[in-house]
Image (cartoon, rainbow, N blue to C red):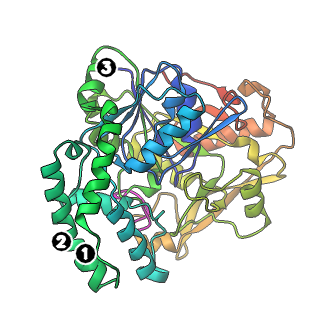
Amino acid sequence: MPALVLLGAQWGDEGKGKATDLLGGSVDYVVRYQGGNNAGHTVVVGDQKYALHLLPSGILSPGCTPVIGNGVVVDPAVLLSELSGLEERGVDTSKLLLSGNAHLITPYHTTIDKVTERFLGSRKIGTTGRGIGPTYADKINRVGIRVQDLYDESILTQKVDAALDFKNQILAKLYNRRAIESGRIVEELLGYADKLRPYVADTTLVLNDAIDEGKVVLFEGGQGTLLDVDHGTYPFVTSSNPTAGGACTGAGVGPTKISRVIGILKAYTTRVGAGPFPTELFDEDGEALRRIGGERGVTTGRDRRCGWFDAVIARYATRVNGLTDFFLTKLDVLTGWEQIPVCVAYEIDGRRVEELPYSQTDFHHAKPVYEYLPGWSEDITKATTFAELPKNAQAYVKSLEEMSGAPISAIGVGPGRTETIQINSFL
């Protein structure tokens, strides 16, 4: 069954857009299954760069149907703006499908998100302030607004009234903010109904039928494994499940239909926002990785925290996702270092630990144990086969593969669409 999950194996920003786009010409459907416009992909096509926040990367591949699944939370204004921006650049967006069961981010969700972060002060999570967490909270609390509610004004009004009865109490009494008028929210949401209508579909039925017909479906995760609400560095995580299991619930496809699970790894490590990061660098090497790698968040615009490759995290990602393959990105960024440290274990209270500790306290105190691998100075951006890489670059890739527990089947050697070495086929 040709159904693949492609996800981040670190803290997000690993280059999933490039990997998805590489496969886009070979697949029939590309599906976002969780997250919202707090995720971002940069895809380079020729001399054109596209920053995607909510849309699946497959929207840039002709012949591919992009799908926003039920597990995604959707800001309708952002979605329509992103569609409009692509159309202005000549991209056909007419094939997009949007699940009628996806939950909507409303203005009161973004307001709650921002004031809560300010209220928390030094204890803040480091959210993007785009209303993602409050929308998922409403979903779990069964007071959320779904896409399908836009087409029943009575139900929509009842749901918004019910949500704001409670939220306005919080805004006024806890945060000293003005109450939000229900009628204004309803009017704004209804204004999106006709614009979104051409895209709304029963995506679960569409995707299951496609798989049964032998079509290739790629499920694309946002963020990364270590930001998963259940399996990440809680509480410094996102509010959904970017791990492979999230593809099943977020798209309505059973686990027996998934054939491959591909993890995207940077050749080093980055993260955005607060939380523990054992290999984080605060020196010239960290600044060089940030500068050479262009490490600025696509969605947030924030500089990413940078550190050396962490094999403990990679092994963990292999375990919790059942990874069958890795796609290693940004190998070219490491060109020029005489030696490249790789974290192979942690030291915690004098103990060597080779698996990710389940205890938040232990992970906060983890210190990296490094092995040093020889670097290379040759330009690798023109390499098209593994054999064309410098010997030390080959050895680095092989070492990471052995430490991480799954084969590295593709390597990114530059930002361009074609600057990728394919070792094994994903299909």
Residue 274: image x %, image y %? 52, 69
Pointer 1: residues within 10 angstroms few (<14), some, or many (20+)? many
Image location of residue 107, percent across then percent down:
35, 62
Q: Is residue 233 magenta?
A: yes
Residue 242 sits above or below residue 121 on the image = above
Q: Residue at x 68, y 43 (%)?
A: 330
**Figure label count:** 3
Q: Which residues are magenta?
A: 229-237
- Residue at the spot x=79%, y=26% of the render? 388
**Residue 236: x, y in percent?**
44, 66
352 displayed left or right of 191: right
x and y, in percent, of residue 9 in the image: 50, 47
Read off the residue under disc 2. Answer: 165
To which residue does mark 3 refer?
210
Q: Answer whether labels 1 and 2 touch (C-beta < 8 Å).
A: yes
State the CA–CA distance, disc 1 to disc 3. Answer: 44 Å
